[in-house]
């Protein structure tokens, strides 16, 4: 039975969609590491940064050249054991795939377009300025991290440590990334001058802020409140066409003293646009307010919506 269940998971669209998302996100992260982090030797709080430190120590003190991608692979393999046992099976397996493809993807970018071809003459910076490299790296990596966190995965390495801090100490993901990153940044004193370490610490702080921003943006929903005499039509449209739940409250107008109903619902941005278009097309008179909600807990889920949609369609066919 368990084998059949595993086979069902492996052949599901959800599984392959998430694999595609992880692969694309990790390709973006690998490009950020290869083109902006490695040439400038910036040590931003990440396992990639720690790997650059370790590779630099081997080269500086032992005269041995060790590829950064190999060090990334080894460290990630060790941290994946922590992810599996301390965070959960699903997170551990998804992160295992993400972490194990990072090093090959870094090598892929090296084959496709070596960074040496893009470096400004006489510099170790793609953008010609270390601060621009830092900003580009953080923006690209933070977007990749936020996408992966949303599907219960991560880029591996630092993100595993951040996820452990988030789970057991209950800090926001951005703060967890910053805490873990600062510890790693401090290792850069072994190979980098003080100035570069400070730049790395600033970058780590920015990384945490931007990760939080992207995660809030990806999770944002619209809380819609509508007061209308046509509340029953609006309720039917939200439930049967948009396929979302809603709540009804009796309210009394402060000026008119009339009693009517207020509808409240949580919608995605696209669903909110569809509702506004439907109200406009049907010339429904209403008073509406809408605000952003950054987190939703409980029964909100796309799988539940699909189930309700199928149930609604079956009901219409039976009628």
Image (spheres, rainbow, N blue to C red):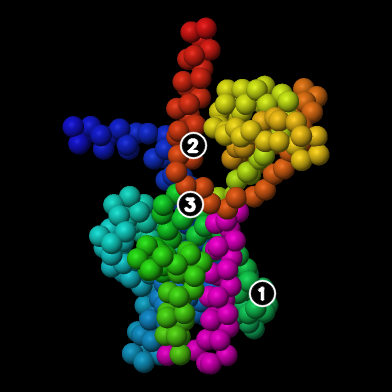
Alpha carbon distance from label 1 to label 3 = 27 Å
Q: Is residue 93 left or right of residue 115?
A: left
- Against 240, residue 181 (above or below) is below
In the image, which disc is placed on residue 302? 2
- Cα–Cα span, label 2 and label 3: 13 Å
Q: Residue at x 28, y 65 (%)?
A: 82
Closer to viewer: mark 1 or mark 3: 3
Residue 78, compared with residue 201, is above or below; it is: above
Count every numbered label the image shows and give the total.
3
Does residue 252 appear in this view?
yes
The answer to whether 263 appears left or right of 105 in the picture is right
Residue 52 seen anywhere in this rendered image of the structure: no
Q: Nearer the viewer, residue 241 or 39?
A: 241
Residue identified by numbered label 1: 132
Q: Residue at x 80, y 24 (%)?
A: 283
C-alpha span from label 1 to label 2: 38 Å
Q: Choose top left, top right, bottom left or bottom right for residue 163.
A: bottom left
- Mark 3 lies on a secondary structure that is helix
Mark 1 crowdedness (10 Å alpha carbons): few <14, some 14-19, many ≥20: some
């Amino acid at each position: 039975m368990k084998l059949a269940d595993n086979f069902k998971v492996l052949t599901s669209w959800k599984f392959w969609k998430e694999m595609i998302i992880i692969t694309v996100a990790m390709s973006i992260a690998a490009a950020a590491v290869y083109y902006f982090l490695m040439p400038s030797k910036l040590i931003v709080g990440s396992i990639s940064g720690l790997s650059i430190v370790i590779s630099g120590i081997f080269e500086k003190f032992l005269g041995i050249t060790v590829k950064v991608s190999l060090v990334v692979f080894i460290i990630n393999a060790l941290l994946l054991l922590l992810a599996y046992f301390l965070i959960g099976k699903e997170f551990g397996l998804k992160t295992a795939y993400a972490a194990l493809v990072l090093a090959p993807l870094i090598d892929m970018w090296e084959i496709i377009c070596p960074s040496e071809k893009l470096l400004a003459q006489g510099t170790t910076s793609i953008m010609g300025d270390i601060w621009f490299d830092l900003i580009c790296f953080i923006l690209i990596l933070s977007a990749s991290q936020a996408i992966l966190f949303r599907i219960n995965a991560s880029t591996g390495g630092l993100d595993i440590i951040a996820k452990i801090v988030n789970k057991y100490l209950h800090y926001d993901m951005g703060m967890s990334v910053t805490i873990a990153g600062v510890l790693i940044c401090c290792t850069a004193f072994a190979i980098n001058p003080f100035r570069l370490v400070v730049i790395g610490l600033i970058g780590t702080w920015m990384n945490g802020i931007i990760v939080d921003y992207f995660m809030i943006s990806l999770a944002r929903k619209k809380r819609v409140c509508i007061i209308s005499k046509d509340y029953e039509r609006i309720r039917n449209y939200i439930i049967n066409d948009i396929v979302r739940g809603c709540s009804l409250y009796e309210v009394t107008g402060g000026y008119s003293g009339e009693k009517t109903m207020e509808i409240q619902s949580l919608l995605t941005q696209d669903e909110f646009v569809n509702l506004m278009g439907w109200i406009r097309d049907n010339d429904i008179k209403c008073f509406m307010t809408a605000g952003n909600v950054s987190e939703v807990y409980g029964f909100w889920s796309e799988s539940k919506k699909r189930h309700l949609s199928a149930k609604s369609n079956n009901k219409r066919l039976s009628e």
